[in-house]
Amino acid sequence: MSASPSIHVTSIDATGTTLECKIRPSPDLRRFFTGEPFRTSYDVPIEDVPEGVLAIPVLAHICPLAWTQGADVYVEEVDATFARALEDVKATLLSMYPHFLEGGQLKACRTVEVAPEGGGESGLLFTGGVDSTSSYVRRREEEPTLISVRGWTITPDASDDGKWADLRSRVSGFADERGLETAFLESNMLSALDHPMVLAHFGHLVDGGWYSSVGHGLGLLGLCAPLAHARGMDDLYVAATHWKGVDLEWGSRPDIDDYVRWTGTRCHHDVYDLTRQERLDLIADYVETESPDLALQTCNARMDGNCSRCEKCYRTAIGLRLSGLDPNDHGYQFSDEDYPEVRRSFERGEWILGHDERYMWADIRDRVRETEPCSELEAEFFDWLEAVDLEELVAAGESPIHHRLLRAGARNAPNGVYTTFYPVWNAAKTGYRRIR
C-alpha cells in the first residue's frame, strides 16, 4: 500500500532579514514543487521571531495546494492561533471549490501560544491602485505601514528588477509625503512551487489563475506574519477586490481574509462595503480635501505609470470622471475621443475579461445612469453601455480554446514530457495573461 500524500516543512531558519525553509513533498506531489527552498526577505531583522510564526509564510502557501490532494502537512512548530485560522480558511475554500479541493490536516509536533509583541501598529498591503488607496484613505488616521510584496505580479526574476524599483519608488514617495513607514518583502513563494504545473492542473477550474482565485488572500497575509510580529502590528489590512453582492470564487474574500490571524495580529478584508466606484468616490473626497495631486497606479502593462490604453486604465479613467475628477490630473491620459476606442476594443474582443470585470463595468453602468454626459461622445458611450449585454462582452473576451486545450494536455503529461512541453505552452499564452 502506498503512503498517503504528504508535505514536510523542515529546516526553518531566520538569518538577519531572510527566512528560509525546505519543502519535502511525498513522491506523488513532487511535480508541484521545483525543489527550491522557500525564501522571503524582509527589511527588518526576524531572528528573534518565534519559530511558530516563522512557519506561517510557507504554510500559507503550501496548505491550499496540499488540500487539492487530501495531503497532510507536517511541521515542527506552529503558532496555535494560526493553526486554528487555517481550519477556518480551509472550510471556506472547500465550500468554494468542492470539485477539486479535498482537505487535509496540519500536523505539528508543537502548537505554541506565542507571546504577542503587540505595539498598537497596523499594516496595509499597498500597491497604489484604487483598492489599496481607498483602504489607506479609510485607515489613514492609524498611519499604517505600507507593505509591498515582490513575488506575484512582480516576479523575483531579474527581468522584473525595473518593475520592482518603480513600485518601491512610487510607494516610498507616497509614504514620505504622508509620514508613513514602508515595508518591502521579496519572496520566491510561487517559484518554490512549480506554479506552471499548478496552473496546468487547476487553472481551468477557476476564473483566473491559481493564486488569484485560490491562494492570494491567505498567502499574502501569511507572508507578512514575521514582519507583523517584529514590528508589533495588531492589525493587518488587505483591500477587497470585490464588494458585497459580488459572489465570485476568489482567493481574497471576507470569509478568508477575516479568518487569518496569529497571536498578536488580526487580519481584515477592507473596503468590502464599497463598490469600486464608491471607492473612487472616497478617493475623490480625499483628493478634494487633502491630496489634489494624488496619482493612482492601476496599469496591467507597466509599473512606471499607466499606459492609458489597457482595459483597466480605461476603466479607472472613466470611473474617475464619474467621481468628478479629471483622470489627466491623477495618472491617466484620457479624453472624449477615447470613448469610441473603448467601445471598439470591447466589441472586437481585444481584452481578456473575467466575470469580475463584468461586475466592475456593471458598477460603472449604474453610475452612468445617474450622470449627465458632458459631451456628445460621452453621451454616445453612455447610451451604448446602458444597452449592451455585458455577458456577451465577457464571452467575447475569453481566452482562445486552443490555449485551454494546451493547458489540459500539460495536466496529464509525465514530468519529463511536461518540462519540454511547458515552455511551448507558456509562449503560446503570452499576451493573454490577466492580472486584475
Image (spheres, helix red, strand yellow):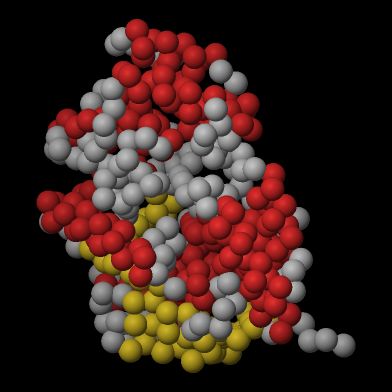
Q: Position of residue 298 (x, y in %)?
A: 35, 44
Residue at left 38%, top 47%? 301
Determine whether 216 is above or below 49 in the image. above
Determine whether 64 is above or below 340 in the image. below
Q: How many marks?
A: 0
Name the residue at the bottom extreme: 11
- Who is closer to the viewer here, 7 or 170? 170
Q: With 267 as the anchor, is 145 left or right in this view? A: left
Residue at left 74%, top 69%? 413
- Who is closer to the viewer here, 387 or 178? 387
- Is residue 141 in sight in this rendering? yes
The quarter holding residue 54 reads: bottom left
- Is residue 259 in sight in this rendering? no
Q: Position of residue 200 (x, y in %)?
A: 66, 61
Name the residue at the top extreme: 376
Q: Position of residue 253 (x, y in %)?
A: 52, 50
Residue at left 40%, top 14%? 370
The quarter holding residue 129 reads: top left
Q: With 64 as the anchor, is 4 left or right in this view? A: right
If the image is split into quadrants, where does the N terminus sit?
bottom right
Determine whether 417 is above or below 122 in the image. below
Residue at left 37%, top 35%? 309
